[in-house]
Structure formats: C-alpha cells, structure tokens
Image (cartoon, helix red, strand yellow):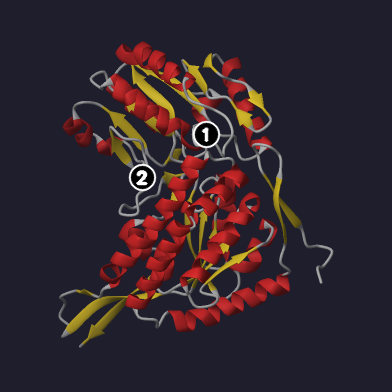
Amino acid sequence: MNTPTQSIFTSVNPYNGEIIGQYTEQSLEEIQVILNNSQSAFSAWRNVPIEERARLMKKAGQVLRDNSEEYAKMISQEMGKPISESRGEVNKSAWACDYYADNAASFLADEIIETDASKSMVKHDPIGTVFAIMPWNFPFWQVFRFAAPTLMAGNTGILKHAANVFGCAEQIAQVFVKAGFPKDVFQNIILHHDHTETLIKHDAIKAVTLTGSERAGSSVAALAGKYIKKSLLELGGSNAFIVWEDADIDKTVATAVTARMLNAGQSCIAAKRFILVDSIYDEFVSKFVEAVKNLKSGDTMNDATQIGVLARKDLADQLHSQVTRSIEAGAELLLGGTQNNCYYAPTVLGNVKPGMTAFDEETFGPVATMIRAKDIDEAFELAGNSKFGLGLTVCTSDTEKALSMSSRVSDGAYFINELVKSDPRLPFGGTKTSGYGRELGKDGMMEFINRKTIYVK
C-alpha cells in the first residue's frame, strides 16, 4: 500500500503535452530492500569471470540495437529530442557496451611494478555498489557511459534518473534483464531527490556519480564528503569555440552549427561562446545565421526534424530570461529570441561581452553567442574568462600551432577543428565548476576501482 507521502511522477511529452506515463515513488522501506539486494548481488557478481561479464555486456549492446526504435521513441517523447538524434544516442550506448566488453580485461589486468620485493604489483578490485544520479538530456547515453565500465569492473549499480525520463530509466533497467545479467546487479529506483542522503549514507553505497547542475553537484559532493564516499561530478559547461583568421569558414560554420544546435543546445559540452578573431567575425556570423535559419524545426517524431523542443517549459522560460537580460545589457539580437511553450527558436546574439548573462552563465538551449576578439591571445583570454572548464574548440588550418597552445586553457578537453564530444575510448570530464573525475576510456573504469598494492617480500 502506498503511503500518503509517496509522490506520483508524471512524464509529459514536451512537444505536444501528452502524458507518456506515471510512476509511483518507492517507499523508503522498498529502497532499503533494493540497497540490501545490491550489496548481496555484489558479493556474487564480483567473482563472475571477466569473460562472462563481457559476454553479458555484449548482449546488452545487442539488446539496445535490436530495440533501438522503441527506445528512441521513448527518448523523443519524454524529453523532446528529434527521433534521428535519439536513434544515434541508443546506438552510441551500444558502442559503450561493446567497448568495455572488449577492453575491460586489459584495463583491469594486474600492473607489475619492479621494487625491492620479490614481487609487487597493483591489483584492480571492484568496490561495491555505485549510485548514479543521471540527467534527462541524454537519458540513455549518460547512463550507459556509467553502467558499462562500472558493471564490467565487477561493481553493481543503482540508477536514480531525472523525474521526467523515468520511462527511459525503466527501459534501461530492462536492457540488463533481457541481456541476462544476474538479478539486482543493476537496479532502477523511483525516488524524489530529497531522499538522496538516505541512499548515500547506506553502507552498500561505496561511491556516487552525478551528471547535472552545479547546485546538484555541490549538494551531492557535500553528502559524499559527509559519509566519506568517493564521488564523481560531471556538471555544466560554457564551451568556447575559437575561430582563427586562417580557418576554412564554410567548414567551420557547418561544424559550429552542429556544435551548438545538437539536442536543441541542451548539452553541457555544446559550444556556447563563439569567439571570433576580428578579421573573420562578420563573415562567420553572416554565414552562421543563414545556416541556422535553414534548420528544420517541428515534430520530434519526424525524421526530417533537426530542432526539437526543450525538455520542460520552465527551461525555455529560463533561457528566454537569459536572452532578454543579455539584450538589455547591449547584446544584438541577430536571429530568434522567441518562445512558444517548450519550443525556443534557434537564436543568435551578436557582440556579446563579459558581464552579459549569455557570456557569464551557461545557456542550456539553442542560443549561440558571438564574441569578437582582436587576436588569438585575446581569444584565449576570453575563453578562459569563465567559471566553467569542460571543453574548448579551436578552428584553424595551422593545427601544429593550435596543438602547441593547448596548455593555454585549463579545460578538460581541447578539440581542434571539431566540436567537443564524448567518445568511449577517451577520458571525459571537466575542471573548475564543471566538476571533477573522469568518465569513459580506461580512466572512467579506474574511478570506481580499488587499486590495491600487492607486495611479496
């Protein structure tokens, strides 16, 4: 029987307002059972041979591909991503499963280290249950980039997803069931974020990973510190996209449009501040505006749609406020700036400067800010003038010069002639208020491992 304090979460399609599903919050008693079951499952799962874990993870990847249309539909309906992008997200999640299935054994192999011992090494042991608090903007990918390395390492996982994508969360949990994973190795919970401390303090939870806002990250990090649990935070970003005067403008504009408008701009690693050397500013801005004008907005279930809606109306309201305040501070509205419920028109702001909202804050939606720099040095100074440190793009024909200047910025990623993106093969994470720790690559697997020193006299 449900207690009076249990919430009902309603998933609403932001494109048309239709109710997708309703989900009843689990009681704290039910959560305790889930936590205890995860702890018990870990005792067995940690001893399953790596080859068997890999077989199951490969199967999970196949389940994703076999059901990609069903999963893509749920993504688009719950958070408003165009269906073509949702399909890509499901397939990328399958890639993460394959990557860790193929590479976990080598990542986890003992590291022999020569000392004065007869034998000394570092052994990689799992740590237990990892609690994942995940966001709505990439509801499958964000989960699988945590789950694939975590489970392959021999840990168990508990997912607390964003409340507007609980349908996706249930489908993800079923992926592991369909793949044949042992019961309780991966579990999904339906719970209000007010109860986060209840989970973090439980003895079963050995670490917590969060992808979300700066405020959520600060709160979770404080709780993890209080209970001395490992934490990993992947937070916001306001990535700079620097264009030098020798860049191929047409190719750069095409890359820039994707870098900003993918997922209707709802991405921590989207390019948000376009910092243009003065001599190419006018040409770049003119071509960028024309390219954005040609993007097709519409029904998220239509294959031709390129720009969907924002995930919730309050997010569109917040974005419109940021645009309005920037214009009041002197930014020039070059395109867009209009809102219709959850839809926000692709928007371009010109002559943006430090101190303006669109420069200083993260704009989580299809708003591109154009910033003029007198030269390369000032471009890097402007790029670094941010509390965020997730990633940066430099566009130029002189790649060697760009490589030599990578240390000019403190961000976690530095891309040349390409938009910043995550890849299972490469570590991903930020600095400053963009968070700490690394996901993906070998580094991502090592985050939730006990690197145990073995010494034989």
Left/right placement of residue 331 relative to residue 423 reads right
User: According to the image, label 1 marks what residue?
Assistant: 264
Please tell me whether mark 1 sits on a helix, a strand or a loop.
helix
Give the percent coordinates (x, y) of residue 276. 35, 20
Residue at horizontal 51 percent and vertical 47 percent from the top: 138
For residue 150, above or below residue 65: below
Residue at horizontal 50 percent and vertical 53 percent from the top: 140
For residue 47, above or below residue 393: below
Spatial CA distance of label 1 from label 2 is: 23 Å
Give the percent coordinates (x, y) of residue 195. 68, 62
Left/right placement of residue 423 relative to residue 76 reads left
For residue 76, above or below residue 455: above
**Which disc is residue 412 wearing?**
2
The answer to whether residue 285 is visible is yes
Give the percent coordinates (x, y) of residue 362. 52, 34
Please tell me whether mark 2 sits on a helix, a strand or a loop.
loop
Question: Which label sits in the foreground, 1 or 2?
Answer: 1
**Which disc is residue 442 wearing?**
none
Give the percent coordinates (x, y) of residue 118. 15, 85
Left/right placement of residue 190 relative to residue 240 reads right
The image quadrant that residue 259 belongs to is: top left
